[in-house]
Image (cartoon, rainbow, N blue to C red):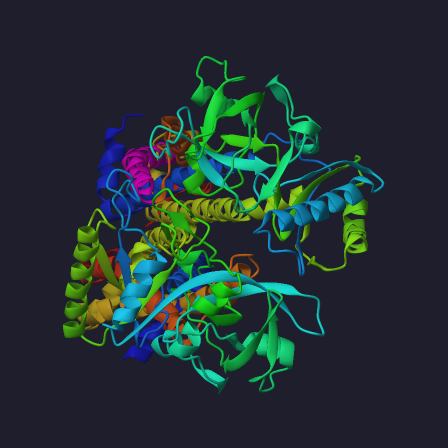
Amino acid sequence: MLGYYLDLALRSFRRNKVLTALMVLTLALGIGASMTTLTVLRLLSGDPLPHKSAQLFYVQLDPYPKDHPFSRSDKLPWMMSYVDAMNLLHAQRAERQAAMAMTRVKLASTQQRPFFDDGVMTTSDFFSMFEAPFQYGGGWSAADGESRAKVVVIADFLNDQLFGGANSVGRNLRINDQDFRIIGVLRHWAPQPRFYSLYLGGPNYGKGEAVFLPLQSARAAGMGPMSTMSYAGGDKEVLESAPSIWLGLWVQLPDAAAMSAYRSFLAGYARQQVALGRFERSRFGLSDLMQWLDSQQVVPGNVRMQTGLAFSFLLICMVNTVGLLLAKCLRRANEIGVRRALGASRAAIFAQFMAEAGLIGLVGGALGLVFALFGLWCIRQQPAEYASLVHLDGQMFACTFAMALIASLLAGMLPAWRACAVTPAPQLKSA
Amino acid sequence: MTLHPMIAALRKHKAGVVLIALQIALTLAIVCNAIFIIYARIQNVQRPTGMDENNLFLITQQWVGAPSGDDPASIQKLDAMLREDVNALRAMPDVESVTPINSMPLFPSSWNGSIALKPGEELREGNARTTYYFGDESLMKTLGLHLIAGRNFSAADVTNKGFRDPAEANMVIVTKALADKLYPHGDAVGKAVYLDGSNKPSTIIGEVERLQVPSVSSWASSFVWNSTIEPVRLNSNFSRYAVRTKPGRLDAVMRQVPSTLYGVNPMRVLDDDSVKSFKDIRAEAYRADIGMAALMGVICLILLAVTAAGIVGLTSFWVGQRHRQIGVRRALGARKIDILHYFQLENLLIAGGGALFGIALAIGLNRVLMSKFEMESMPVYYVLAGLAVVVLLGQIAVFVPARRASNVPPVAATRSA
């Protein structure tokens, strides 16, 4: 039966070529614009570590004085002081924990002129907690960090650039004019968004950092964080003891029990700091990875606005399609009358018109896919830091057709309903 | 012609009428908000920075193996290296003026703080937020700023300090916007201010007409024109220089910069991004805004085209359906122009109704955008202009099918539909 309906649909398309082309084109434009922006939005608001994000938590404390709060809207500071980070780290109350700060490093090798790249100063659990895979070697131990060992883990792209992809473990890398021994090389690892770097002064998206250094070793070598803030007056020369916040602390808590235990530990810690006179407020925050990204509003306003615009556009295209389909099907009242008189039920007429709408949806979806590919190509030419990452994957490919089909079937419902309400007798008389 | 028969006729096509009206309403709501966004972005992009933007470029470089800058001796060493660079740049042919500087308007690096009228006050509320520019006596000439009161720094006023040294300069030049905020009576020159909660006063010695802060992000939107200039060479293992060239010699000088600086001292990092004309800095700062405005513009045009096509399609269908009635009217003495007017008036009614609903939608949408995207309230004339556009669009779109209707011969009345 469906074959027959599709055949009828094709005949009707051939009769009204311009009208049909117009419907397909408007639907395709709407679908193309929506899919382009949706693909970008999905990339930007995606889960950087889908298997693990529910176990990773970001910790916040509030060392700011009551009368000079961190924010007027009472948000918690998004970084932590060295003293607090080390206290929480050494308490070892979570399964894994790591403190980190971003830094800018000057890298030099014998062959090339020195160049700059991003680096992470962090503690030993970083790699196991964030599931960063090693190609060669491994990370450092907590003891290496404490002894300020000059060791470094490098990213795959830096290894390719400097050592042609060979096993470089054991070789030296000159960072900010000092030698560091390479102890590990990562496989390609660049979770998007850059959840651990974005609030520490690093980029929100992109290829990731080139080097990973033990926090204390990097500090001993004179490296500083990209972003620091002060919560009180006083000596700010030595960041470790200064009233400054500049670190991010992540903990891994495997289940709800561990989370509530950690929560009460944090509450106790904050109250203790108030009692010691270090803090004035005992507030704290423990947000899981996705909540944290959400609260940081990592998706740029422009992208959200474009997505809204594209979907409003699709809505107008759908209203337009409803109008044109309605006009088309009412013009065919005679044909409907004849089919009804020959025994077609109302359901059959309804199905016929829905099949026609669906066919428009499929063709519109195919054309919309072309528009979406073009739109994504345009976005890749933009200078935004996420631009090169934007691609249409299998899921979004299927989603394009699903959306086109749903949009066209929704648009086809009213015309099909009107068509099946046609009474055969008057139509036959007037014909 | 009375409206009564027309409304009676429209009642027979409720679905079609509602669809066209709805489409027009949505189009109006989106188009006038989009145009408002475009306008806001363009206005943002076009504001002058206060500098003479031609023949200006910025150099960013870092020394390799430079002293740390943590002790007085190494700071003096760094300062000597910086002055060596500045002198070499000043000696280049076709260079008019050079200053060491920490950033520039629209450049993605800034040093922000706040200025107070009382010592030791780190102002969050009530204080004037500001961005600091550090340079020497040539900064005014290099950037091409307009001094409107007081005087420029002299060479003797200029000091140097380490990058992390919190000491504040004895004197500053501020923008008029900042001066008026601190001293609303226009007598800021000669008065003392306290920078970043310092206990030591700094004297305002001059006022410049206008100088934008580096950041174009929304967080800096409350103090875009509050700039403070300090007569200080900042010493660290990296440095920036702003260079003004003779008219038309910008490219030639920029090409010569790497070899000149490597000639002074080869131990430094200078990459592709290190030497940048102000034109490029401006283009990069506003690329996202311009891209967004262009996208909005394209979508608006497509939207208007889609809506027009929808009106043509549906009206054509009505004309076909009423073929016989039109013939009857013509046979009864209606002129061609009457038929044309009938369809035009009908469209005006539908478009007008839709547009009224659209005005409400447009204002509602604007409120939503204001709450979510830090947008301003849309002035009424945008809505009125949008109304005019969609009504006009309706009239243009309806003209083709309406003219076809007016060409229906009276004899159609005698034929069956």
Q: Is residue B355 magenta?
A: yes
Q: Which residues are magenta?
A: B343-372
Query: Number of callouts in the render?
Result: 0
Q: Residue furthest right?
A: B93
- The relative height of residue A406 versus residue A282 in the rendered view (above or below) is below
- Residue A115 appears at what percent x and percent y? 64, 64
Give whichever of B124, B107 is nearer the camera: B124
Left or right: residue A50 compared with residue B139: left
| The N terminus of chain B - image quarter | top left
Whether residue A90 is visible, yes or no, is yes
Residue, x 57% and y 84% (percent of image)?
A170
Give whichever of B378, A288 is nearer the camera: A288
- The relative height of residue B157 versus residue A408 in the rendered view (above or below) is above
- Residue A121 appears at what percent x and percent y? 45, 66
The image quarter in which residue B156 lies: top right
Magenta residues, dominant SS class: helix
Give whichever of A278, A381 is nearer the camera: A278
Left or right: residue A347 compared with residue B247: left
Q: Is residue B6 magenta?
A: no
- The relative height of residue B26 versus residue A340 in the rendered view (above or below) is above
The image quarter in which residue A13 lies: bottom left
Left or right: residue B9 compared with residue B230: left
Left or right: residue B82 compared with residue B304: right
- Residue B412 appears at what percent x and percent y? 38, 44
